[in-house]
Image (cartoon, rainbow, N blue to C red):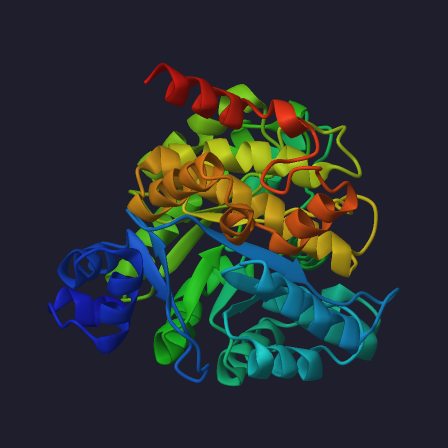
Amino acid sequence: MTRIELAKKGIITDEMKAVAQAEGISPEKLASDIAQGLTVITRNNLHDIAPLGIGRGLKTKINANIGTSKDRVSYDEEIRKLEVLVKYGADAVMDLSTGGDIKGLRNTLIKKSPIAVGTVPIYEAVVRTTERHGHIAKMTPDDLFDIIEEHAKDGVDFITVHCGVTQKAIERLRHDRRILDVVSRGGAFLLEWMIYNNKENPLYDQYDRLLELAKKYDLTLSLGDGFRPGCLVDATDRSQIEELVTLGELRDIAISEGVQTIIEGPGHVPLNQVELNIKIQKEICKGAPFYVLGPLVTDIAMGYDHIAAAIGGAIAGAAGADFLCYVTPAEHIRLPNIEDVKEGVIASKIAAHAADIAKGIPDAIEKDRKMAQYRKNLDWEGQASLSFNPEKVKEWRSQIPPTLNEVCSMCGEFCAIKTVERALQKKS
């Protein structure tokens, strides 16, 4: 039986108990939320990792994307990226490789990753098709489904599938006045295939086949947003919302069949529309876990898109988003390097933590209370230990060492904490 089927029968598994303990909730509540499709546990039984819970009442999780392209194929670099993103607190990693030995790298990542691994199977299906036949139009539905099953057999924990890219949605897109029509790579691949072949999206047309595969391997489906806005002007338009309605319908079918689903959300959204987008998704998709790319709250932060995404991610998380996909400083510019991955993860972790404070997650609130006490005590080791990058805190502190060890070199002898403490002691 799948996790949903077990939960519906009231069977509490060891996996559910582990997630419940990690999240500080009761196993019964977790099982109830899984049964209703409000929470998922993403772990392939072939992947020996701690199960990851994503959904209602749980800590906000973050994902980091890595992977090769035809312009840059370095397996050692991708493994190093994995090590860095794990070190700085990513909860999941997605392999978006399109260059080199994609299967070989995926299997290495799964073997070495202590966290959940996700993929987008359409990428590899397109790469294989173009290598063999020269054009994406030659891909068959069987080619795509064979790749999906291959990923599941390899031990992938969750996959992104753009089931909402339909012929009806493409017609709507033709009439919308978008500046950036489709920026989702998977969505663009499927759109091109559908137009060349004048056929429906096989992930939508043969959705029952997809569910059968997912159920066989208890694979979590992340229903991708092929029509997510790629700029602020296109945000929250009809193409985006209509696809969301389709994803909501597909989510209901999946839950009834015992298949776990996540709903993917927008990329570029104005600050004043972020909360609105989360509420719309939660309403249309009946509280399903929501996975957002950022969202980025401005289009002109090139080189600093991780900051734009962290701003949007904090607001999205506070409003109810469950899973944040990081954005690196290299977004819109180039393939991210190791330092980009590090900065992207830290920025996203800050956003997730800020969201968890707003959500009232006890662990998050307690960490900030401890930090305040460490600062009160001028405990620099304690402060560094709670920071998102302890090495950076210690390095920067050593660059301009203070005359008095217990303070920092900005205020020195005029440290406000010491001044007030001295004054209050004298008055008493």
* Residue 69 percent across, percent down from the top left: 80, 65
Q: Locate residue 382, reporting x and y percent.
A: 49, 50
Quadrant (top left, top right, bottom left, bottom right) of the N terminus: bottom left
Q: Quadrant of the C terminus?
A: top left
Q: List the single residue furthest toward the top.
A: 427
Q: Is residue 62 left or right of residue 300?
A: left
**Residue 180 falls in which quadrant of the image?**
top right
- The structure residue drawn at horizontal position 51% and vertical position 23%, both measured from the top left corner, is 273
In this view, 122 is above or below 280: below
- Residue drawn at (60%, 57%) of the image: 64
> Which of the 4 image quarters holds residue 213?
bottom left
- Give the total of numbered labels: 0
**Residue placed most toward the observer, 351 or 119:** 351
User: Which residue is farthest right?
Assistant: 71
Between 170 and 28, the one nearer to me in the picture = 28
Q: Does 140 sit left or right of 17 as displayed?
A: right
For the question of whether residue 353 can be seen, the reply is yes
Expressed as whole percent of the image width and height from the top left, the position of residue 23 reads: 30, 57
* Residue 55 vertical placement versus 272 (above, below): below
Residue 27: horizontal and vertical position, in percent?
17, 63
Whether residue 188 is visible to the viewer of this picture, yes or no, is no
Q: Residue at x 38, y 44 (%)?
A: 364
Residue at 82 percent across and 74 percent down: it is 74
Q: Is residue 21 above or below residue 406?
A: below
The answer to whether residue 330 is left or right of residue 274 is right
Report the residue that reaches farthest toward the left: 10
Residue 316 vertical placement versus 217 (above, below): above
Residue in front for this viewpoint, 280 or 115 = 115
